[in-house]
Amino acid sequence: MKKKTGVIRICTDYRDLHRACPKDEFPLPNMDILMDLTSGQGLLSFMDGFSGYNQIKMSPKDAEKTAFRTPYRNFYYMVMSFGLKNAGATYQRAMTVVFHDMIGK
């Protein structure tokens, strides 16, 4: 599909994969609580989360499950793709591990 800017975007239907995979119930943060925790702090930094979970590499055995076909050849994602059921929970788990010593401070 073409985006409004003219750039081509690949859209993949993961419905069958989602039905086959269990939901990861890792809790996402409550934004109200996070914002309240910033009040009174001398420094506030926003990490550039633009790419977000697209920076997380897929396990080779799981990457094969994201395969899609084009008229030219078959491809699969080597990084976590937009639209995967557990992408948000996987990203949050990674950020919790990275920033574990800073959470709540």
Image (cartoon, grey):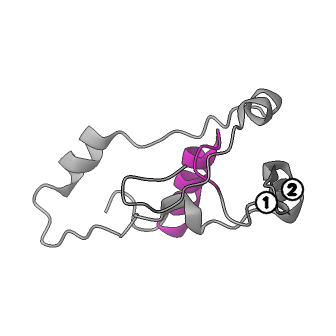
Q: Is residue 100 magenta?
A: no
Element marked by disc 1: loop
Residue in the foreground of this view, choosing between 76 and 43: 76
Q: Is residue 94 magenta?
A: yes
Where is the C terminus found, in terms of image quarters? bottom left
Give the CA distance from mark 2 to mark 1.
6 Å
Residue 30 image-quadrant placement: top left
Residue in the foreground of this view, choosing between 90 and 81: 81
Residue underneath mark 1: 76
> Given the image, on which type of amino acid does mark 1 rest?
Tyr
Q: Earlier in the sequence, mark 2 or mark 1?
A: 2
Residue 70 located left or right of residue 40: right
Vertical placement of residue 38 versus 43, above or below: above
Residue underneath mark 2: 64
Vertical placement of residue 93 versus 78, above or below: above
Vertical placement of residue 35 versus 51, above or below: above
Residue 67 image position (x, y, % from top left): 82, 53
Q: Is residue 95 visible?
A: yes
At a point 19% along the width and 46% down the height, the residue shown is 36
Q: Which residues are magenta?
A: 81-99
| Dot 2 alpha-carbon crowd within 10 angstroms: few under 14, some 14 to 19, many 20 or more | some
